[in-house]
Image (tube, coloured by chain):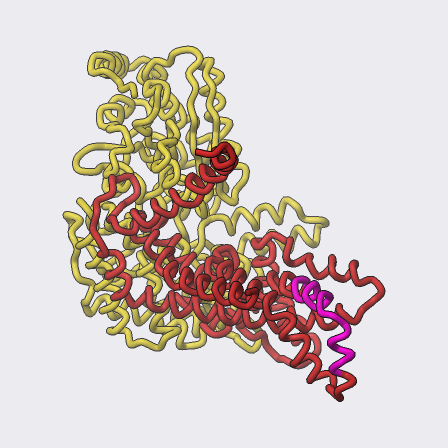
Chain colours: A yellow, B red
């Protein structure tokens, strides 16, 4: 396995610093490590529902390959098989050179010794790609070392049908309590229209919203240092009560708990629910529908639907607004035979120009986190109300395991589905709220107690 | 060593290597991993029976075992009954019998993911889309949709139905082959003795099918107990953990929680029970043959 020698790294860093100090335009290009001709890399990227984004990311990688006379083999994973692919690759020692990683992966993979320490590289390319905001640091820094470079936030938002709210003169919700009140006001079960659709399922639509809810009520299962902390608190009781009351009070379709990843989108777009949490793929679907309108009347109807689908930030709680989201970053695996080329590829793809290119094909689901790209993306996100909200994703972002750093244990708490199984036990098995919290707390503690350091 | 014995060993060698490489070693490896605290990306450490003890005390695992039993027994029982009915009907169809036999095999050869998605759609309560709800509402039998998948019982029923639909043709075709091997003279003799259709079925057909039934049931029990696709696609083990079975739970523990040792333990926990079951059935079959 080859690594960057200290001499090479220092030479690169000095070169980059000197270039930056001199203020030479496009200093970025020189900041990235040199690439030998014929370099061959494997790049793993996330495939989302928004096909143009996937193509844009692949095109960006191929531009780098063309520029350097190199080859990049792009392999996709989806949210469904992300874990399976990485786990199999780690166990079979076939990890890619460069991989796109979700929020919990850097802590988990760095702990396994799979990722290269990019602390020096991160500083080296800061002038080119920019700095991450402080709230993203818990994702990228593990035990004081930077293992990944953050790229974008893929956040869920609180989608509402604005015209439904206006018709009934109901205030747009800003807190979880207000969402419930609004749901009651808008609920028309006899017409198969419900005030809300929030599933506690085994997808980010479930555990993601549960974390936004808990953190906004000031409940975290970890300390600032990332150690276990009990969630048996009055604040958790209130949060769990909200999570289960929305089922008990008849303001959601009866099968909401059994929805998988796409049914909240479908029910919302079909106007069967007034509010739901989802990523901007709803906007993507509605914008696409407008583009595919068959005639003027159809177009008008679809444009109205697009204008009425309002994406709000996740509701706040008594302790503020803390929006859980997926933070995607780029990491380099130690197994790479060409770390310089891998670094160069990462620097290229995360540059403001390339990031903005991908972002423009993302229908708002790709919110850059590095300050240079964020500054340059303001115009794009000024397109309309929804995009202005999408553009602020990085500001509200909190990671898994808040208020502590993302740790392997925190990531396992999310992956074990204990966060959503607990409310399901109240809703399905008729447990009391306290019983469910006790069960959840025991499971979380067990994860922290038994996970190897 | 006699020449023939040496030749026999040589001929058996490829098979021996295959058995060791593809069955014995993976099984030994799984057994070993279940005795370790192996985490993905970390070396394994021997912990004895710790994983087994943990699972015995884990309320989720107990629920998973219960769900697996309900899913397996429910699916296999439904397959036996409908397979028998299918074979009885086809046994009396003389024209187009092979066509129907082929037709009924379609579910068995269809991808289980497609089957799961189709049944998910059939049970969907999304107004105007779920097949059962749409039909019942259009017929005026329902005013609003029924949320089949919302309750633990409904979700379990839905996954059992999907598994049954995929598996019953195999039972039907096997029973049909078994029925065709039963001598017609036995039916004639029974009829002469005054046996009606039900008595002929009970005293001639069923005993004649005994061996086929045992084999199909054992095979199906093994396949159903390890079924993953249908549940993962239809419910992901939900609502809550109401349809979480050994295969899906094992996947969740091994791949999402990265606890490989414990995940393997989940999947092989019932192996001793299955081995005893298979041994008993094999012994019974051999005794009958002797």
Can you name the residue that lies furthest to the right here? Answer: B95
Q: Which of A223 and B211 is in front in this view?
A: B211
Can you name the residue that lies furthest to the bottom here? Answer: B194
| Coordinates of residue A186 in the picture (x, y in percent) | 48, 71
Q: Nearer the viewer, residue A415 or A67?
A: A415
**Residue in the picture at 35% in, 77% down:** A430
| Coordinates of residue A42 in the picture (x, y in percent) | 43, 26
Q: How many labels does the image show?
A: 0
Q: In which quarter of the image is residue B288?
A: bottom right
| Coordinates of residue A103 in the picture (x, y in percent) | 32, 43
Looking at the image, can residue B159 be seen? no
Q: Left or right of A277: which side holds A32?
A: left
| Coordinates of residue B16 in the picture (x, y in percent) | 46, 39
**Residue in the picture at 52% in, 75% down:** A188
Looking at the image, can residue A429 be seen? yes
In this view, A158 is above or below A147: below
In this view, A204 is above or below A130: below
Image quadrant containing the C terminus of chain A: top left
Our reading of the magenta stretch's main secondary structure is: helix
**Residue in the picture at 74% in, 70% down:** B183
- A394 in magenta: no
**Residue in the picture at 46% in, 71% down:** B70
Image quadrant containing the N terminus of chain A: top left
- B178 in magenta: yes
Q: Give the range drawn in magenta.
A: B173-190
In this view, A393 is above or below B49: above
Q: Left or right of B106: which side holds A309?
A: left
Can you name the residue that lies furthest to the front here? Answer: B2
């Amino acid at each position: 396995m080859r690594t960057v020698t200290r001499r090479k790294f220092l030479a690169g860093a000095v070169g980059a610093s000197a270039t930056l100090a001199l203020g030479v335009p496009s200093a970025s290009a020189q900041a990235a490590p040199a690439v030998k001709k014929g370099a061959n890399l494997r790049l793993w990227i996330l495939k989302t529902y928004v096909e143009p984004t996937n193509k844009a990311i692949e095109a960006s990688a191929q531009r780098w390959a063309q520029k350097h006379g190199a080859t990049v083999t792009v392999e996709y994973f989806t949210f469904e098989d992300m874990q399976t692919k990485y786990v199999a690759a780690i166990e079979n020692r076939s990890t890619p050179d460069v991989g796109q990683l979700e929020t919990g992966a850097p802590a988990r993979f760095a702990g396994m010794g799979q990722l290269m320490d990019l602390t020096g590289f991160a500083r080296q390319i800061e002038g080119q790609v920019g700095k991450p905001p402080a709230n993203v640091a818990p994702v990228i820094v593990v035990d004081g070392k930077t293992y990944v470079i953050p790229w974008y936030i893929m956040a869920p938002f609180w989608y509402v049908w604005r015209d439904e709210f206006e018709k009934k003169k109901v205030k747009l919700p800003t807190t979880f309590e207000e969402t419930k009140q609004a749901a009651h006001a808008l609920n028309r079960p006899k017409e198969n229209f419900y005030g809300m659709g929030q599933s506690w399922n085994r997808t980010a639509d479930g555990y993601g919203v549960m974390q936004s809810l808990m953190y906004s009520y000031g409940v975290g299962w970890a300390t600032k240092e990332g150690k276990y902390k009990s969630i048996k608190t009055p604040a958790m009781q209130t949060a769990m009560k909200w999570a289960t009351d929305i089922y008990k009070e008849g303001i959601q379709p009866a099968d909401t708990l059994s929805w998988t990843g796409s049914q909240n989108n479908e029910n919302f777009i079909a106007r069967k629910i007034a509010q739901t949490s989802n990523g901007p793929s709803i906007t993507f679907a509605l914008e696409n529908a407008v583009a595919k309108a068959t005639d003027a009347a159809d177009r008008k109807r679809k444009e109205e639907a697009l204008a009425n689908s309002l994406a709000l930030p996740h509701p706040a709680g008594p302790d503020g607004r803390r929006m859980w989201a997926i933070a995607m970053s780029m990491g380099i695996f130690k197994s790479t035979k060409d770390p310089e080329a891998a670094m160069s590829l990462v620097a290229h793809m995360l540059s403001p120009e390339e990031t903005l290119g991908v972002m423009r094909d993302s229908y708002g689901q790709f919110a850059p986190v590095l300050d240079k790209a964020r500054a340059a993306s303001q115009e794009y996100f000024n397109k309309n109300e929804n995009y202005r909200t999408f553009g602020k994703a990085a500001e509200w972002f909190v990671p898994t395991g808040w208020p502590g750093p993302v740790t392997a244990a925190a990531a396992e708490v999310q992956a074990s589905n204990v966060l959503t199984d607990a409310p399901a036990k109240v809703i399905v098995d008729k447990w009391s709220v306290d019983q469910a919290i006790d069960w959840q707390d025991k499971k979380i503690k067990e994860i922290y107690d038994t996970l190897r350091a | 060593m006699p020449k023939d014995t040496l030749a026999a060993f040589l001929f058996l060698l490829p098979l021996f290597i295959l058995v060791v490489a593809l069955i014995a070693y993976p099984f030994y490896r799984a057994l070993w991993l279940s005795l370790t605290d192996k985490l993905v990306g970390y070396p394994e450490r021997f912990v004895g029976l710790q994983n087994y003890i943990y699972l015995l005390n884990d309320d989720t695992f107990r629920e998973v075992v219960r769900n697996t039993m309900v899913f397996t027994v429910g699916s296999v029982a439904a397959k036996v009954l409908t397979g028998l009915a299918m074979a009885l009907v086809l046994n009396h169809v003389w024209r187009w019998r092979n066509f129907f036999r082929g037709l009924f095999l379609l579910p068995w050869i269809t991808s289980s993911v497609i089957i799961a998605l189709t049944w998910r759609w059939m049970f969907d309560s999304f107004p105007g889309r779920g097949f059962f709800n749409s039909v019942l509402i259009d017929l005026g039998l329902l005013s609003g949709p029924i949320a089949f998948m919302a309750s633990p019982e409904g979700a379990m029923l839905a996954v059992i139905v999907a598994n049954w639909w995929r598996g019953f043709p195999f039972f039907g075709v096997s029973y049909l082959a078994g029925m065709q091997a039963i001598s017609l003279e036995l039916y004639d003799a029974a009829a002469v003795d005054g046996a009606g259709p039900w008595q002929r079925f009970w005293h001639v057909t069923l005993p004649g099918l005994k061996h086929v039934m045992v084999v199909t049931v054992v095979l199906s029990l093994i396949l159903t107990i390890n079924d993953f696709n249908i549940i993962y696609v239809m419910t992901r083990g939900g609502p809550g953990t109401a349809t979480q079975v050994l295969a899906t739970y094992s996947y969740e523990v091994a791949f999402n929680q990265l606890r490989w040792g414990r995940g393997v333990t989940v999947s092989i926990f019932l192996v001793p029970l299955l081995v005893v079951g298979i041994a008993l059935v094999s012994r019974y079959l051999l005794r009958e043959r002797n």
